[in-house]
Image: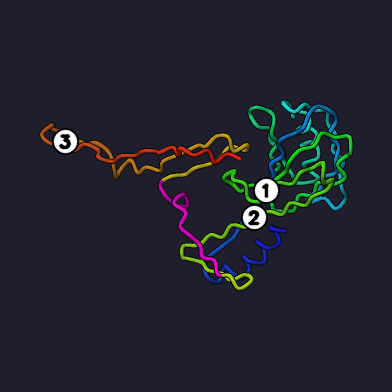
Amino acid sequence: CAGEVSKTLNNVLSDIGASSTAYTIVDLKNFSGSGTVTFNIEGKNENPIQISANITSSNLSNLVLSINSQSSLTGIKATLSKDKDRVILNNEDGDDILISKLDSSSPSFTASVINDNGIIASSEVQMGINDSARFSGLVKLNSSETISYVANSVTSSSSQNFQQNGIINIKSSDSFEKKNVDFSINKDADKSSGSNNGSKAISASGEYSLTIPGINFFP
């Protein structure tokens, strides 16, 4: 699982001043209709736990409640989207999330892994055609220098993340429907001031802006 990969990497990366984190986020959506959805779920638990809930395609509240009632055992937290038609599963330790034994009478739905920006990171799995699926997480590498690695004879290199340790901190809501943007501003370095006698004045010149993309990246 991604969590174990991250632990192994950290034993090596610490020597070069880098680190890694892991997480597993799965997006459940496109429920086909109303009824009782029943399946087994596994995260950190060794034995599958059955989840069962009465739902409609436009209200998955009961499914979220059922999954979260077992969070202490599975390590999986469920979040309901604002319009109540999507469920986001999150395992912060990067354990695989396994959905199995989907009941044949359950409404079908799709499931896919997404990254920590809410962008789809895997192909969608049609749950209904498949009664079981395993979803592996993602590993994020962090370093002040460029990192390159070779896998299956293909070399990949890291790119700069302007959000990392910069003046802008962007955090997604648990359902990835909202972004909270904070500017880290040094008030002492950029402020208006004046002399005591009023003969001199300095006006702050810093400018901060935000451009919203015109393309919908939402899964």
**Residue under circle 2?**
138
Label 1–label 2 contact, CB within 8 A: yes
Q: State which tag comes first along the sequence, 1 or 2.
A: 1
Is residue 160 in the magenta section? Answer: yes
* Amino acid found under the numbered disc labelled 1: Val
In which quarter of the view is residue 139 placed?
A: bottom right
User: Percent position (x, y) of residue 174?
Assistant: 62, 38
Vertical order, 166 against 209 (above or below): below
Position of the N terminus by quadrant: bottom right
In which quarter of the view is residue 78 placed?
A: top right
**Residue under circle 1?**
113
For label 2, count other residues whose C-alpha is less than 10 Å away and answer few (under 14), some (14-19) or many (20+): many
Q: Is most of the magenta stretch helix, strand or loop?
A: loop
Cα separation, mark 1 vs mark 2, equals 9 Å
**Disc on res. 201:** 3
User: Percent position (x, y) of residue 181?
Assistant: 47, 38
Q: Which residues are magenta?
A: 155-167
Question: Element under label 3?
Answer: strand
Name the residue rendered at 73%, 26% in the picture: 59
